[in-house]
Amino acid sequence: MINLPTRRKVDITMAERTIELLRKYARPAFRGDRRRRLENMNRTWLLYLGVFVASAAFFSAFWMLAPASIVPPAATDYVRHYAPVAENLLAGQGLTDRFGKPAMWFPPGYSCLLAGSFHIADLLGVSHLSASFALGVVLHALVATLLALIVAQLWDVWASLAVAVLWTCHPLTLALIPMVGSELPYALFLLVAVVFFWIGAYGEKIRFLQLGLAGGFLGLAALFRAIALPLPFVMTALLLTRLKGISWRWRLTGAGVFFAAVLAVVSPWEIWMYRQSGRVYPISNHGLASAIDGLTWARPSEIRASLSVP
């Protein structure tokens, strides 16, 4: 007696045959696509690593070969505040200024960053000013690379390289390196915050992790420059008005995550200032004046002459 295959057995046989064909032909193709993607990714990272190295080399060579007559002196804020506070940190005296008082005149971020670079300078046997210069070169090159990466997502590789070249060769950008100010780390953390905010708020759905990272990096930016104070409110307003297809519940949750991350980064510094002075200050004890500094310089000279600008 001949047993004819049932419909179930035929279906199983066809399914097994289909799986066998997929394993034979589709898997190698998938591996090839993945390999190509990895190769393209590696080439992309190598390209932007080249942008970083080229920017750093250009900055270093420019100021090492420049005549002393065109090299601007270190900024007054660096000489009077940032460098003394960093040296006191390195000496184990905490966040104190050159007079031994709690250093609340400026946010603490740049002084802490300088303290790390001064420690490396001591290990290498170089001057603290040279370490500050090297830190500025690295920060400038990082900003150039990050700008190139952002532009590459919006346009193409050539546009990103053009932006990196423009940033690297801009006269104001070049002048900021020997002046060793807090503008560079502020710009770096602000750009990173904007990138994460864009990913978290302007995709198909709200991404809470990216919004939290955006708030954290924006808080770090505020610890370098008080001008970042209004930005959490502006970005929260953008978040609430941007996603019209998403319920208010999710919008408010995203805004809460973003704002909570900002406060989590800034709060320890605010608590420390309150314990030292008994007063609540916005980022520093003249934070609001620093926050409107740029607006002050946009006004006519006869008006701003009577204003107290730090």
Image (cartoon, helix red, strand yellow):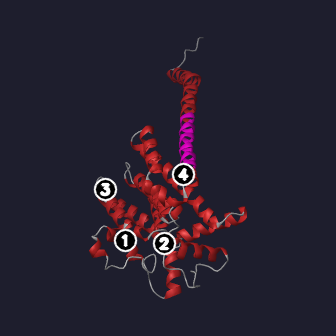
Per the image, label 1 sits on a secondary structure element best described as helix
Residue 18 higher or lower than 250, as above or below: above
Q: Residue 162: give x, y in percent of width and height.
A: 43, 42
Reading the image, the residue beneath label 1 is 293
Find out whether the residues at labels 1 and 3 contact each other: C-beta distance under 8 Å.
Answer: no
> Going from the N terminus, do you reach mark 1 or mark 3 first?
3
Marker disc for residue 266: 2
The residues tagged by marks 1 and 3 sit, at their Cα atoms, a distance apart of: 29 Å
Residue 216 higher or lower than 205, as above or below: below
Q: Amino acid at mark 4?
A: Phe
Per the image, label 4 sits on a secondary structure element best described as helix
| Part of the protein shown in magenta | 38-58
**Going 55% across and 29% down the picture, which residue do you hit?**
30
The residues tagged by marks 4 and 1 sit, at their Cα atoms, a distance apart of: 30 Å
**Going 30% across and 67% down the picture, which residue do you hit?**
298
Q: Nearer the viewer, mark 1 or mark 3?
A: 1
Q: Nearer the viewer, residue 133 or 227?
A: 133
Find out whether the residues at labels 4 and 2 contact each other: C-beta distance under 8 Å.
Answer: no
The residues tagged by marks 2 and 3 sit, at their Cα atoms, a distance apart of: 26 Å
Reading the image, the residue beneath label 3 is 242
Residue 245 among those drawn in magenta: no
Residue 191 in view here: no
Q: Amino acid at mark 3?
A: Arg
Q: Amino acid at mark 1?
A: Asp
Find out whether the residues at labels 2 and 3 contact each other: C-beta distance under 8 Å.
Answer: no
Q: Nearer the viewer, mark 4 or mark 1?
A: 4
Reading the image, the residue beneath label 4 is 62
Q: Nearer the viewer, mark 4 or mark 3?
A: 4
> Going from the N terminus, do you reach mark 4 or mark 1 first?
4
Q: Residue 80: give x, y in percent of width and height.
A: 53, 76
> Going from the N terminus, do you reach mark 2 or mark 3 first?
3
Q: Nearer the viewer, mark 2 or mark 1?
A: 1
